[in-house]
Amino acid sequence: MKREVYIFVPGILSKGHNTWAQRAVTHVQTKTVAKAERLAYWAGPLTRRFRQRRRVRGLRKMVDFYLRESYTVHLVGHSNGCDIIRRLLIAYSRSAPVSLGRIVMIAAAIPASYHRNGLNAALSGDNGQAYRMPYLYLSQILVLSDPKDRALWWGGMSRKALGWMGLGYGDLGRRGPDELNRQAMQITRHIEQPGIGHSGYFSPDNFGQTMTRILKPTQK
């Protein structure tokens, strides 16, 4: 059986040892035979765009290490963590072929449109030049969303007002996936959880269910 690793990428304002990502790492390591890691970083609401590329490079180093060791790599992000994962997937689609496991996007602060967020192009191998086979292969993308997510509602409003400055947030985690091409539709699953809130996925009442969804492939 191929070895697996889950890499958790938290959102902004995530610091310390009792974050959801650290609890998720502990859960995987104590409840399964898989390995688990988390990408540790600090960012505020207005500063997250700074050093985002550095965070992507840090995540890529982690992923590349496990790929070299022949692991199946699963990526799990929350809010801004999903943007870091999205940027990594786009980067991989423009370089050498890579195959990853499941991508779980929780309350994702990226554009809901797969056309706008770049995932359509990443999955189809369309780099704006002559047609080529895709370099990025994913087993599944799972999107967990809440149409009442107030944090992403305000983030979307700030994007409309301040997007020209590189500020604001997308709303995949509120609206759910939109404008998917054929490749994206084949592997994307969506679970809507009205009223759970932006971080309620990790509350004591919901943490177990969230981890079950992270660890088990979601059927149509």
Image (cartoon, rainbow, N blue to C red):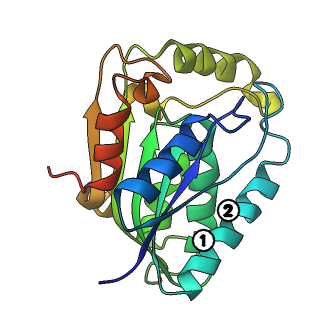
Examine the rendered structure and indicate whether residue 113 appears above or below residue 195: below
Numbered circle sitting on residue 63: 1
Q: Quadrant of the N terminus?
A: bottom left
Residues at marks 2 and 1, CA–CA distance in whole angstroms? 6 Å
Residue 2 figure quarter: bottom left
- The residue at 79%/28% (across/down) is 44
Identify the secondary structure beneath mark 1: helix
Residue 201: x and y in percent read 41, 28
Give residue 48's position: percent from left, percent from top: 77, 36
State the SS at label 2: helix
- Horizontally, is 189 left or right of 50 in the view? left
Residue 95 visible (yes or no)? yes
Residue 15, percent from left and from top: 73, 35
Residue pointed to by mark 2: 59
Q: Residue at x 60, y 71 (%)?
A: 63
Judged left or right of residue 13, residue 4 is left
Q: How many neighbours does mark 1 have within 10 angstroms: few (below 14), some (14-19), or many (20 or more)?
A: many
Q: Which amino acid does the dot numbered 2 rest on?
A: Leu
Q: Are marks 2 and 1 in contact (CB under 8 Å)?
A: yes
Looking at the image, which residue sits at the far front?
A: 30
- Kind of residue sitting beneath label 1: Val
